[in-house]
């Protein structure tokens, strides 16, 4: 299973009026090894265990395996995760044939807005909404696993 995804910063809140759905997400990481991450995520009343591999150099594609797990088990696993949780609101926006997911981060990552677009292949074109900003695909500091360790509110904003 391959995940092919492009990530962008979001430069305005205009996406909110275009959203057809939104959900609260909380997640933690059982493992954040550079070669793979193991995440537990709760979205509403559903929970998922996900394993993601490392992207190849310069690639937007990486291995991803995900399985739904019982909500009670997910809450138990969150209790043993590495320090640093991710809490965010995810907005879903239709853009042509794709769905853009915009994550509005909370807590120590408040102020960060990241959009993701999943593609069928690395060369696939897509309709780019006007509120999409700079592309940050492949920049590890924007991975949730890294945001759990190095939160956005602690970044040196002058060097961005």
Image (cartoon, rainbow, N blue to C red):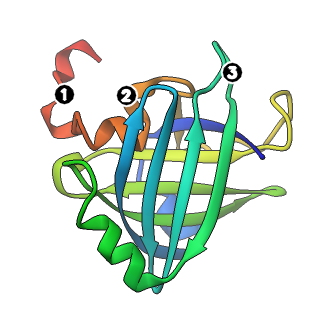
In the rendered image, which quarter is residue 86 located in? bottom left
Label 2 near label 1: C-beta < 8 Å?
yes
Viewer-side label of 1, 2: 2
Residue 35 or 122: which is nearer the viewer?
35
Mark toward the start of the polypeptide (3 vs 2): 3
Q: How far across and down, in percent of the image, does residue 22 sit?
A: 49, 74
Name the residue at 78% across, 46% down: 1
Q: How far across and down, in percent of the image, does residue 143 sit?
A: 43, 37
In the rendered image, which quarter is residue 62 located in? top right
The vertical placement of 58 against 13, above or below, is above
How many numbered marks does the figure carry?
3
Q: Which residue is mark 2?
A: 141
Label 2 near label 3: C-beta < 8 Å?
no
The vertical placement of 109 against 156, above or below, is below
> How far is mark 1 from mark 3, CA to CA?
25 Å
Q: Which residue is mark 3?
A: 59
Name the residue at 37% across, 56% down: 104
| Other-residue count near label 1 (Cα within 10 Å), few / some / many at <14 / 14–19 / ≥20 | few
Q: How far across and down, in percent of the image, does residue 71 sit?
A: 44, 83
> How far is mark 3 from mark 2, CA to CA?
16 Å
């Amino acid at each position: 299973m391959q995940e092919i995804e492009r990530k962008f910063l979001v430069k305005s809140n205009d996406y909110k009026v275009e959203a057809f759905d939104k959900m609260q997400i909380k997640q933690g990481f059982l493992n954040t090894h550079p070669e793979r991450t193991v995440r537990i995520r709760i979205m509403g009343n559903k929970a998922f265990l996900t394993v993601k591999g490392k992207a190849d150099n310069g690639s937007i594609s990486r291995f991803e395996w995900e399985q739904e797990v019982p909500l009670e088990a997910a809450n138990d696993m969150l209790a043993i995760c590495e320090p640093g949780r991710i809490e965010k609101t995810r907005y879903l926006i239709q853009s042509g044939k794709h769905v853009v997911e915009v994550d509005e981060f909370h807590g120590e990552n408040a102020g960060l807005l990241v959009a993701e677009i999943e593609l069928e292949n690395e060369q696939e074109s897509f309709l780019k909404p006007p509120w999409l900003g700079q592309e940050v695909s492949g920049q590890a500091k924007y991975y949730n696993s890294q945001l759990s360790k190095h939160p956005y509110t602690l970044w040196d904003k002058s060097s961005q």
